[in-house]
Image: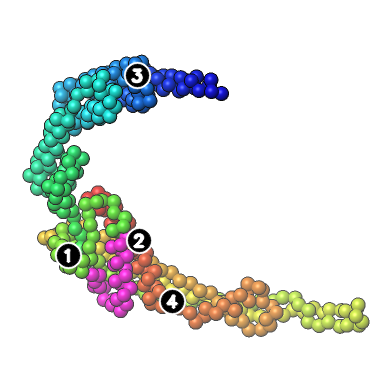
């Protein structure tokens, strides 16, 4: 077994060298350097691996420098960002070589840190200059573009000044929508203020949690006042029409009959004679319905009071119950007839709060959906 150890060690070293060589042949020079350095760490005298690492470094540098020359001659707006990335990769190669004393002594790797810093500054300058141009136009959409440019600049430097500028631009680009408390102008006054308040809170919560435009934010009137928010738009909600229906009954009467055993004559235990007869009953069925609907009008105004959008949303609620009474012989009733007779809903009518909750829920779903759609294009 001891005789096998030198063979196994040789095999492992050979495999490591071949892996570095394969990466080198494929043109994956960085991977070839990384594999080769691991091999040199185990065997600093491996000249074959050292040769692979030296050549891989030379060709990797050549590739990046060719890219830099090509980018320097281009007119692409992002050329400085791309050149910075090339120098960043060259600097990573430098640090990789420097991490191995054996490789560092055999390869004169260049320190590109000054180039990295130069093109970092150039990339930041390009994005901040673009941001300044968009800011000079002075429109909200332009502030958004400026915000994105500063965000790109922050990829190169997480400076406090840039972060402060980005936050300032976001505030300038933001459209602040304030909801005015719901009003009534259709003559109907609803007394459940908690239910109305909850309706408005649910709209705000749904919009806030499902924003598809990061530059639109919604506030209640109380939030705007307490946070000293100056709104860009005011959202007016008005219950223009509420029709809570009254129960409407429609009755129908029908007669039913059934052949049943009306008498049994027992002559002896195993001899029974049944006499059949017809029993009848009159069933009166009541179908009670309650139809209600409500309209909510939304009006969106800008700071000057000009209407920029309005729409109408309708909620509908339909409730129905069915029950029966009968006269005559109960034995004439079918199972379905008995269920309707035993239905205890003859005195039940939905309360006003229950109907309003259903109407407002339907309006809320439609309203939130259309508002998200409207502001996604804003």
The residue wearing badge 3 is: 45
* Label 3 element class: loop
Q: How far apart are labels 3 and 1 at the CA level?
A: 70 Å
Quick one: SS at disc 1? loop
Tell me: 341 left or right of 186: right
Viewer-nearest of discs 3 and 2: 3
| Residue 54: x %, y % from top left | 29, 18
Q: Nearer the viewer, residue 42 or 299?
A: 42
Q: Residue furthest front?
A: 2
Q: Mark 3–mark 4 contact, CB under 8 Å? A: no
Give the residue furthest to the left.
Answer: 136
Determine the secondary structure under disc 4: loop
Residue that appears at 32% across and 24% down? 33
Label 1, label 2: how far apart the Cα atoms are: 28 Å
Image coordinates of residue 219 in percent, x first then y, are 22, 63
Sequence-first tag of 3 and 4: 3
Q: Which residue is mark 2?
A: 365
Q: Residue at x 25, y 27 (%)?
A: 98
Which numbered tag is attached to residue 350? 4
Closer to the camera in the image, 223 or 255: 223
In this rendering, does residue 153 appear at all? yes
In magenta, the rendered stretch is 181-206
**Image location (x, y in percent) of residue 332:** 69, 78
Question: Is 341 situated left or right of 121 in this image?
Answer: right
Q: Earlier in the sequence, mark 1 or mark 2?
A: 1
Residue at mark 4 to residue at mark 2: CA–CA distance = 22 Å
On the image, numbered disc 1 is attached to which residue? 227
Which quadrant of the view contains residue 27? top left
Depicted 219 relative to depicted 101: above or below: below
Q: CA distance from mark 3 to mark 4?
A: 92 Å
Magenta span contains residue 203:
yes
């Amino acid at each position: 077994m001891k005789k096998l150890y030198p063979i196994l060690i040789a095999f492992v070293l050979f495999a490591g060298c071949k892996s570095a060589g394969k990466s080198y042949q494929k043109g994956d020079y960085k991977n070839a350097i990384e594999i080769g350095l691991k091999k040199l760490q185990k065997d600093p005298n491996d000249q074959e691996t050292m040769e692979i690492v030296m050549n891989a470094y030379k060709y990797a540098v050549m590739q990046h420098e060719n890219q830099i020359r090509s980018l320097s001659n281009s007119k692409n707006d992002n050329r400085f960002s791309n050149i910075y990335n090339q120098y960043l990769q060259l600097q990573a190669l430098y640090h990789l070589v420097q991490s191995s004393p054996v490789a560092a002594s055999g390869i004169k790797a260049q320190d590109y840190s000054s180039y990295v810093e130069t093109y970092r500054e150039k990339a930041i300058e390009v994005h901040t200059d673009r941001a300044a141009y968009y800011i000079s136009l002075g429109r909200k959409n332009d502030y958004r573009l400026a915000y994105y440019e500063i965000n790109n600049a922050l990829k190169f430097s997480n400076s406090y000044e840039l972060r402060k500028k980005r936050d300032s631009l976001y505030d300038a680009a933001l459209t602040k929508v304030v909801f005015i408390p719901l009003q009534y102008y259709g003559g109907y006054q609803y007394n459940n203020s908690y239910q109305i308040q909850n309706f408005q809170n649910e709209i705000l919560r749904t919009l806030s949690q499902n924003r598809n435009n990061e530059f639109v934010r919604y506030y209640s009137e109380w939030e705007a006042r307490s946070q000293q928010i100056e709104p860009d738009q005011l959202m007016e909600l008005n219950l223009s029409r509420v029709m809570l229906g009254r129960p409407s009954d429609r009755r129908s009467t029908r007669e039913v009959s059934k052949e049943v055993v009306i008498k049994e004559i027992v002559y002896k235990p195993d001899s029974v004679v049944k006499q059949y007869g017809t029993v009848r009953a009159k069933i009166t069925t009541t179908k009670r319905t309650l139809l209600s609907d409500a309209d909510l009008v939304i009006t969106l105004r800008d700071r000057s009071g000009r209407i920029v959008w309005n729409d109408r949303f309708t909620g509908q609620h339909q409730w129905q119950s069915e029950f029966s009474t009968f006269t005559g012989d109960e034995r004439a009733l079918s199972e379905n007839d008995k269920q309707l007779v035993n239905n205890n809903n003859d005195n039940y009518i939905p309360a006003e709060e229950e109907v309003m909750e259903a109407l407002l829920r339907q309006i809320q779903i439609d309203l939130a959906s259309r508002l998200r759609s409207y502001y996604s294009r804003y």
